[in-house]
Image (cartoon, rainbow, N blue to C red):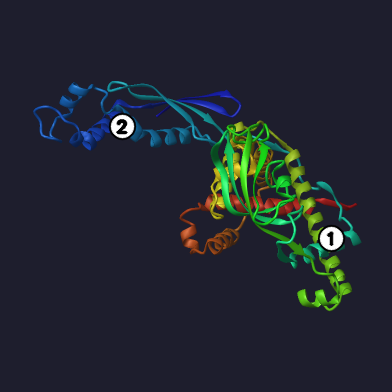
Amino acid sequence: MLKSKTQVETNKYELEIEVSPEVFEDAVQKAYLRNKSKINVPGFRPGKAPRKMIETQYGEAVFYEEAVNSIYGETIEEAVKEAELTLVAAPDVEVTDVGKDIGVKFKAVCITKPVVKLADCKGIKVTKKVEPVTDEMVDHEIEHMRERNSRSISVDDRPAQDGDDVVIDFDGYKDGTPFEGGKAEKYTLKLGSGQFIPGFEEQVVGHSVGDEFDINVTFPEDYHAKELAGAPVVFKIKLHEIRYSEIPALDDDFVKDTTDFETVDELKADTRKHLEEHAEEHADADVETAILEGIIERLEGEIPDVMYENKVNEMVEDLAHRLSHQGLDLSTYLQFTGMTEESLRTAYREQAEKQVKLRLALEQYVADNSVEPTEEDVEEEYKKIAEQYNMPAEEVKKYIRAEDLKLDVAVSKAVDEIKAAAVIENA
């Protein structure tokens, strides 16, 4: 079936593929049998018209499209296998010729996994810096604890001020007409948070419970909704409630009521200990990141852009999946954050490039250093996945090929080897 293989660029091949007239004729006959009951031919009951009569009335190529589609997948797959290519994206395929006497001819443009080189990754030098914990950091952490234990108190004897939480109804109008997303009831807003567009929160300040008033603001020129960008609008407001947070005093009684400690000094000592542990963990994470960056720097090779795009696609799909568990969809998230899908993809691009390069580098390290996981390693990984998804390991094996999982385990082992060989200097 593979007629020729031509390398047209780095990581790009063009395949010429042919399907014999006999194979194509069989596909056309099967297409006829599947569809003859749906085709009306004068003088014949439904499903009884001979193929030749149908082709005479509707054209010789009446079944060609379905016949080509029926053999397309297997034909291309076998040709790619015969060409010994490892693809990183679905091939771009076109039918160049088709007919009873010639069969089918395809041209497939294939983007292949790049051939890369990896310099020696043993002994990567990195610096570990543990940030010292200061008294100010301890005080800041305890201040957060006090804020978490604050009481929310409603007030009706004074106007709203910066820092208050207010409960409002709002209804937005542009040129006297309500606009989408501009209305809500009993919405809680912290004044001064910058949550709403500039000028909105400032105009709530000074109003009291029960007040009904208008707010005049102009949307930013770069606002994500083009129909509102730069537009002056009016929000009709009703103020239902004003609340402020009362933060408890830091004393031994507060410590006894909210923690397992007896005194403020004990609380501060424990807080310092946890901050120091966190600083150590953060420094370790920075060291690992530096080692991985060092691996990427040692990679040489021309990487197809489609690999980066595929990774970005995965990241966007993963975000959409995680949002769905929070009751949101991607479009709503983009509206809330003021982003477009294009800007989201741009934000993911650098991370995607690093992930692709790192994976290629680690796979090359596995090949260069003959990293070979044991059967026990692979079985243990199947077990972990099974526990994670609460399903039998044998069921997991139906979805994840042993060869693919084996490579994943080998890559993990490669990371461990490189980390263990790294030279870490303390700052």
C-alpha separation, residue under disc 2 versus residue under disc 1: 69 Å
222 lies above or below 261:
above
Quadrant of the image occupied by residue 76: top left
| Pick the front one: 203 or 322 | 203
Kind of residue indicated by mark 1 = His
Residues marked 2 and 1 touching at CB (< 8 Å): no
Q: Position of residue 50 (x, y in %)?
A: 14, 29
Foreground: disc 2 or disc 1? 1
Q: Which residue is mark 2?
A: 66
Residue density around tag 2, few if under 14, some if 14–19, many if 20 or more, within 10 Å: some
Asked whether the viewer can see residue 109, the reply is yes
Q: Position of residue 5 (x, y in %)?
A: 49, 25
Quadrant of the image occupied by residue 107: top left
Kind of residue indicated by mark 2 = Glu
Q: Helix, strand, or loop for circle 1? A: helix
Disc on the earlier residue, 2 or 1:
2
Q: Residue at x 82, y 59 (%)?
A: 280
| Pick the front one: 20 or 268 | 268
Asked whether the viewer can see residue 372, the reply is no
Count of numbered marks: 2
Q: Which residue is mark 1?
A: 140
Q: Residue at x 14, y 28 (%)?
A: 41
Q: Helix, strand, or loop for circle 2? A: helix
349 lies above or below 140:
above
Instruction: Name the outermost residue toward the left.
Output: 43
